[in-house]
Amino acid sequence: MQYIDVVVDRDSVCMADDIVDHRRNYSFSVKMTMYELLTILPQQYDFPRIGGGKACWVVATNRPLICAVVAQEENYKPRYIISSITPILQMFLEGQDSILHFNYLTQDKPSAIFKKIQQGYYKEMRWNNLHWDSR
């Protein structure tokens, strides 16, 4: 079986959270789908619990590709931007590090963020030093 090495990272949620490195290395089957990936990651990756329970994240790769919106208030059940059956191998560029980044959008409503992405609001977002930047 073939595997792909993926670095999973996330934004910090507060100043105290800045002192910890959030990057984790994983090896996943190249046949794994986006659905399978986002089913196991909330169980294996250290997502902080936000007071009020409304942390919202945009899941993106360094391709760059916006993949999904996940939220603490929805038990991290993804709202997919790309097809949930997309093999994760297609989410990354060959010959580059494979990075999956969770961009923290504070306590915004996941339905509103999902709608904005569908409307192209974040088309200007670009990968910049492992973080999304809306410049």
Image (cartoon, rainbow, N blue to C red):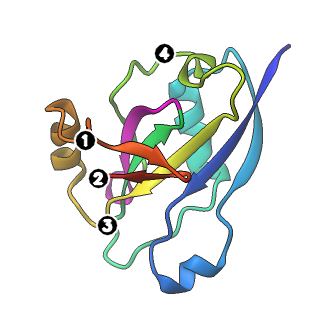
Give me the C-alpha separation between circle 2 and circle 1: 10 Å
Q: Which image quadrant for residue 16?
A: bottom right
Q: Residue at x 39, y 18 (%)?
A: 83
Q: Earlier in the sequence, mark 3 or mark 4?
A: 4
Lateral position of residue 68 relative to residue 61, left or right: left
Q: Which residue is mark 4?
A: 85
Give me the C-alpha separation between circle 2 and circle 3: 18 Å
Q: Position of residue 91 (x, y in %)?
A: 54, 23
Q: Marks 3 and 4: CB-CB under 8 Å?
A: no
Give me the C-alpha separation between circle 3 and circle 1: 16 Å
Secondary element under disc 2, as helix, strand or loop, is loop
Q: Of tags 2 and 1, which is closer to the observer?
A: 2
Q: Is residue 18 above or below residue 60?
A: below
Q: Which residue is mark 1?
A: 122
Q: Earlier in the sequence, mark 3 or mark 1?
A: 3
Mark seen at residue 98 = none
Give me the C-alpha separation between circle 3 and circle 4: 28 Å
Lateral position of residue 134 relative to residue 99, left or right: left
Q: Is residue 10 visible?
A: yes
Three-letter amino acid code at the position of disc 2? Arg
Mark seen at residue 135 = 2
Q: Which residue is mark 3?
A: 106
Q: Earlier in the sequence, mark 2 or mark 4?
A: 4
Q: Position of residue 62 (x, y in %)?
A: 54, 37
135 vs 40, nearest the viewer: 135
Q: Marks 2 and 1: CB-CB under 8 Å?
A: no
Three-letter amino acid code at the position of disc 4? Ile
Range covered by the magenta-colored residues: 63-75
Q: Outermost residue toward the right?
A: 1
Q: Of tags 2 and 3, which is closer to the observer?
A: 2
